[in-house]
């Protein structure tokens, strides 16, 4: 992977007011969508709400004729510029903040139950960071491992029937972000965070070390790493923080390799 240039890690003075969500830094990410009509409808929802970046991961069917029919000519540019990837990790690599959407909640799926609260949280984050809104397949949604790639997880409150059409879910979240774009309130900007590919390299390094010292079970390390990921996702980690954690891992590995006989 090519080396990326990083902005200075030195803190900058925060402005006194934040102009709402920066929609230019928001992307809709559809993971393994089954129907091209839903891709087109999601593009149209993004166009309606001022979000122009669409990322599609491993689509089952990406028939552009059917996609464009639902997108209409208004969102044709978004479809033309959409990015297609084979796997979710690669697709999320350049993002600094990732939000997963799920209808299923539970002890292993701590979520924000209110998209409006999410929009408020994204106001300072979106100023200097690329943000991905990730939606899973229509029939299964995102798995626990896929949600482990996210900094935050949100669910859309509903009545008795919790399952929403994919494009409907996209529209609800995009609308809340659009509604928060014009708010002008005192807040502090969140500095530029580490990119997803940096975090994944850190997690791989941590997993290797934690297995080596028997802190996590080597038979199912990804399951136990979910707890580690959840802990770090609560910390706004910058590139220098990731470098520090990886430096600690290298030092642990070096110390463990020393011959102390």
Image (cartoon, rainbow, N blue to C red):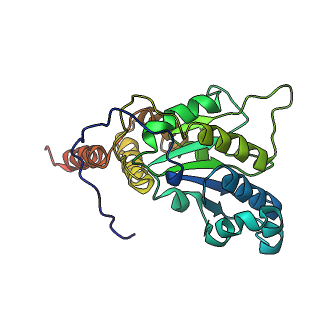
Q: Is residue 144 visible?
A: no
Which of the 4 image quadrants contains residue 188? top left
**Left/right of residue 11 with respect to residue 56 in the rendered view:** left
Above or below for 104 versus 38? above
Q: Is residue 70 visible?
A: yes
Above or below for 187 versus 133? above
Q: Quadrant of the N terminus?
A: bottom left
The residue under the point 44% across, 52% down is: 196
| Image location (x, y in percent) of residue 259 | 16, 48
| Image location (x, y in percent) of residue 151 | 50, 40
| Image location (x, y in percent) of residue 48 | 70, 52
Q: Nearer the viewer, residue 116 or 156?
A: 116
| Image location (x, y in percent) of residue 247 | 23, 48
Q: Nearer the viewer, residue 152 or 217?
A: 152
Q: Nearer the viewer, residue 192 or 197?
A: 192
Q: How many marks?
A: 0
Q: Quadrant of the C terminus?
A: top left
Residue with the most extreme left position: 261
Which of the 4 image quadrants contains residue 10? top left
The residue under the point 23% across, 41% down is: 11
Above or below for 211 versus 89? above
Which of the 4 image quadrants contains residue 5? bottom left
**Left/right of residue 247 with respect to residue 32 in the rendered view:** left
Residue with the most extreme right position: 160
Q: Nearer the viewer, residue 2 or 20?
A: 20
The residue under the point 21% across, 46% down is: 251
**Left/right of residue 102 with respect to residue 127 in the rendered view:** right
The residue under the point 78% across, 69% down is: 68
């Amino acid at each position: 992977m090519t080396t990326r240039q990083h902005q200075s890690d030195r803190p900058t003075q925060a402005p006194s007011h934040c102009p709402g969500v920066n929609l230019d830094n928001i992307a809709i990410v559809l993971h393994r969508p089954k129907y091209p009509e839903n891709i087109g409808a999601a593009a149209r929802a993004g166009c309606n709400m001022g979000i122009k970046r669409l990322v599609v991961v491993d689509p089952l069917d990406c028939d552009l004729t059917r996609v464009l029919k639902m997108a209409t000519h208004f969102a044709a540019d978004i479809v033309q510029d959409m990015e297609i990837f084979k796997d979710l990790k690669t697709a999320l690599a350049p993002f600094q903040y990732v939000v997963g959407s799920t209808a299923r909640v539970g002890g292993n799926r701590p979520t924000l139950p209110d998209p409006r609260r999410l929009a408020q949280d994204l106001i300072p984050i979106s100023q200097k960071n690329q943000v991905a809104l990730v939606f899973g397949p229509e029939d299964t949604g995102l798995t626990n491992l896929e949600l482990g790639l996210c900094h935050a997880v949100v669910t859309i409150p509903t009545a008795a029937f919790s399952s929403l059409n994919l494009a409907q879910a996209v529209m609800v979240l995009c609308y809340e972000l659009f509604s928060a774009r014009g708010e002008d309130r005192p807040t502090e900007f969140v500095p530029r965070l580490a990119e997803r590919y940096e975090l994944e390299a850190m997690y791989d390094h941590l997993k290797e070390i934690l297995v080596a010292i028997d802190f996590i079970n080597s038979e199912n390390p990804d399951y136990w790493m979910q707890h580690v990921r959840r802990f770090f996702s609560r910390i706004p980690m910058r590139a220098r923080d990731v470098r520090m954690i990886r430096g600690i891992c290298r030092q642990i590995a070096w110390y463990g390799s020393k011959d102390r006989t």
